[in-house]
Image (cartoon, rainbow, N blue to C red):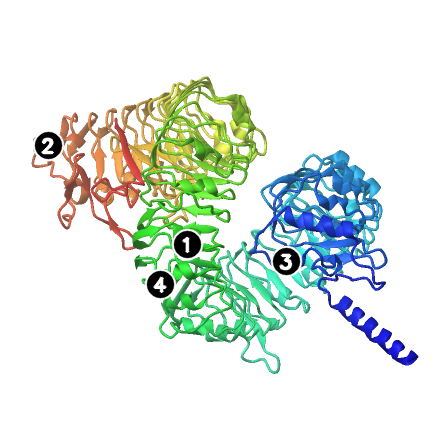
Amino acid sequence: MSWLCLLFLLFTTRQFNSTCSSSSNSSSSLSSGHLCHPHDSSALLQLKNSFSIDTRYYYSNRTISWQKGKDCCAWSGVTCEKMTGHVIGLNLQFGGLQGNIHSNSSLFSLGHLKRLDLSENDFRGSPISSKFGGFVSMTHLDLSDSNFSGPIPSEISHLSNLVSLNLSQYSLSVVRLDTLNFNRIVQNLTNLKELQLYGVDMSSVVPDSFNNLSSSLTTLGLSDCHLQGKFPESIFRLPNLRELSLGFNKNLTGSLPNSNWSSPLETLMLSETRISVDWHRLTRNFKSLRDLSLSNCSFVGSYLAFVGNLTQIMELDLSSNSFGGQIPWSLFLNLESLVYLNLGGNNYVSQFPEVDSNSTGMASLYDFSKQQLVGPIHRHLTDLYLYGNQLNGTIPSWLGSLPSLKVLELSINNLHGLIPRSIFELENLRDLDLSYNNLSGTVEFEKFSKLQSLSYLGLSSNHLSLSFNHLSNNSWPQLYSLALSSCNISEFPYFLRASPNLKSLHLGSNKLHGLIPRSIFELENLIDLDLSSNNLSGTVEFEKFSKLQSLSYLDLSSNHLSLSFNHLSNNTWPQLSSLALSSCKISEFPHFLRASPNLWRLNLSYNRIQGEVPKWFWNVAKDSLSYLDLSHNFLTGTARQLRWKNLGYLNLHNNYLQGELPIPSPSTFFFSISNNQLTGEMPPTICSLTSLIVLDLSNNKLSGKIHQCIGNFSQSLSVLDLRNNNFHGVIPGTFSNGNVLRNLDLNGNQLEGSLPPSLLTCRELEVLDLGNNKIQDTFPNWLESLPKLQVLILRSNKFYGEIGIPKTKFPFQKLRIMDLSYNQFSGLLPTKYFEHLTAMTNSQEHELKYMGEGYYQDTVVVTIKGFEIEMVKILTFFTTIDFSNNTFRGEISKVIGKLKLLKGLNFSHNELTGTIPPSFGDMCNLEWLDLSSNRLFGDIPEQLVNLTSLEKFNVSKNRLVGPIPHGKQFDTFDYDSYSGNVGLCGIPLAKTCGPHQSPPSSFQQDGDLEHENGFDWKVVLMGYASGVVIGISVGYLVLSNRTPGWLVKVVGIK
């Protein structure tokens, strides 16, 4: 019997051990036979019941196994101490937990915890409780990316046994760490090997504090921490440091150590910092590097000469560095361990190398542009990013011979031709983006679906013809993201019904018409849907979208849809983060927005919403909203206190809002409330907007003085537009060195005094518009040294005196628009300046481009043929000079004829004498020429007949004599062009020329001329190199029924 007892005991023990070893996530039962401690079991159940569970998370089912009466040591994510049964480990990463962690949470009664991972949950802005400092045995604590907020408590420094601490945050909520508490952590946590603080606001931490970090540290993550100042070189020398991440600290400076030593660093991230990177130092001292990220960095010396020394490198990111010329393929393809290469966002212009037809054995690449061998095809490459360059030529077929390639990113280049067949043979290809190129040909979409690993496909904005014929019944279960915007698609691809895992679908800017198909509402996993800028019609019950449980991004802008929100008013839509319904004929604010607490982006522009903004709207998503566009509606009343804490973009342009100027949160980088009816003075709280890039308060009724802080309150300020208000006083003189101001528009106010010399610090300035004020000063010659100034408008002020001569070698070298009209300038015309206006003499700008940025388009008012025209967009090749209504005297220099790019020239209403220079006939792009009301004499040069673009010509009220030329454009000018010159004769004047005064002749103009619109503007047909035939204004102004209203407005007549 004894052997039977022994056998029984052996069997039961093995069964128990088997159960123990099979529990998930390293959960442990008790080999001693003890169950989970009842106190800990109760605490865990209370913890579970204090949260709701978001089932979209990876491990949201983790707490399902937590049942009363069952051993908690067998629960998912729970680890117990074998002898006592106390819980010592808790892993709830990606657990889908939603709710607050209060200081009385049962979590803090688990006093034996050694490892705690609460990362990737949503604790809804809860503060990090000081109770976390009570886990005296804790060795590993991870609270990362779980929507905590507020200061990191000093009690964290009590966890003296910590080996790993991760408090990183990537959500909108702000976690802060000051110098005092950071020093406590550094001094007390001497066993720390891993410290990760990504996204924590450490702006107040002094960089020297890092000198006290433990020499045992192996991982230090400080990316996106708002660090500023000089980072200590000693950190690079820490003897055990394997991973250092400092990226996205844009004000962090410093340099790599100069002396020789061997660093054990394997991962180094310096992207988006101002730390100087010396390639020689880097490759000499960091030979163990395997992962190097240097995106948008500050390089010194020859930037790629030594990259070949990084023999261990596996991942290399050199994106967004403005590297130009040809890609040095030989440097990269000879790095034998390289698997990840990112050269995106640079200025590389080369073609891909081609396979050397003469190579034997292993295929080699040959660069025909350099006539040199590149090296063998690098078959280990898994990720290749070349987006955002200027690569040309075709996509090489050898890319399809990279058997390990998973990511191929070639978007935003100038590639043309067909997609090579070999691309469809990349069995491991996961992400393929060829968007924004010039690719052509017919693509059978079925070929993409047969790539078994392909989950992301981007073909937007090419010249491809997509065929879905053989794909309608095929399933594509692995497809995760599909971007087919601007692909000339006229019908919804039916294969979408067989793509159950699709999460992102972009079909914007196509030719889709009719109703939105039901199949779209059956994509249960859809997160991101863009159907904007199509011809979709019909009534859409918005409730259908809200039932897509994962949908968080929706764009239906610019269609012909009728949206119904009837059944949605009481529904919650917690996952909604981005909603764009621009140009959707909406007449009121959708009420369901009240139940969208996580909304990040909202665009309701160009709708029909009228009346006051409802009170409830000012509280919508007040903790998360970052982008709000309500422009081009009919909103009235006052803009209440703006309560959105994290607002970055706010556009209230073109409404009927009244009252005082509202001030958004300090995080705002774009603020436009122009074209409203705001009154009162600019509040001093505007000085708190230290993140502003664009500030547009134009076309209101604001008054008072412009605060002095405006000049330097934001080092990132690029656009300051205060035109057409009632501001008085002087222009702020506080522009500081290093500012990035690009556009300063103060036109149409009551500003006085002189120009502040501090404008000279604005080295990025492109537009300076000070017109229509009361500024009294001499001509600001000192502005001539601004290297990027393109638009200078001083019209209608009290400027006086002579222009003088240049003080620099290349004055106003980029100037294209110069308006000094309606002042009191005197003396001779500034011939020396005209000689140096190189932007009006020759230019590389031939494409249809406009001045401005992604968020803001520059606007300027110029006088063209007697009309003040507001150019809502400024073409980069538009050029004009207006010196009218001053007291300039003397002759007009022939040097002006060299300004061959000039579109308009106005010297009218001065005291000019002499003759009209025949060289004016060389200004082949001239469209209007006004020399009226001067004292010019002599003939009208017959060379002017060669100005085939000339549409407006006025030399009235001078002392000209002789016959009026005829032919071409001169046959279109009427009496008003020549009146007040008693010595002129010929058509269109009544006075005929005598037998010895026959007018200069030219061939007759082909075709008839049109008279259009009430302003009697003559449209002259003109042919350009592009083959486009357009009327006066060369594609930038045509005031007729076909006028692009977004481009120009007639704002007055002079």
Residue at image point 51% right, 42% down: 597
The dot on residue 530 is 1
Q: In the rendered structure, find residue 64 and report the number of the disc placed on it.
A: 3
- Disc 1 to disc 4, C-alpha distance: 13 Å
The image position of residue 519, as x and y in percent, is: 38, 62
Compare marks 4 and 2 and give the one earlier in the sequence.
Answer: 4
Q: Secondary structure at mark 3?
A: helix
Residue 776 higher or lower than 464, as above or below: above
**Image location (x, y in percent) of residue 264:** 79, 57
Which residue matches tag 2? 989
Residue occupying image coordinates x 64% and y 53%:
294
Q: Position of residue 1027 (x, y in %)?
A: 27, 55
Q: Earlier in the sequence, mark 3 or mark 2?
A: 3
How much space separates mark 1 and mark 2, taking CA atoms?
62 Å
Q: Position of residue 951 (x, y in %)?
A: 22, 40
Mark 4: which amino acid?
Phe
Earlier sequence position, callout 3 versus callout 1: 3
Q: Which residue is mark 4?
A: 492
Left or right of residue 658, residue 597 in this image: right
Marks 4/2: CA–CA distance? 65 Å
Mark closest to the chain's N terminus, 1 or 2? 1
* Number of residue marks: 4
Residue type for callout 3: Ile
**Spatial separation of the CA atoms under disc 4 and disc 3:** 40 Å
Give the residue type at disc 2: Leu
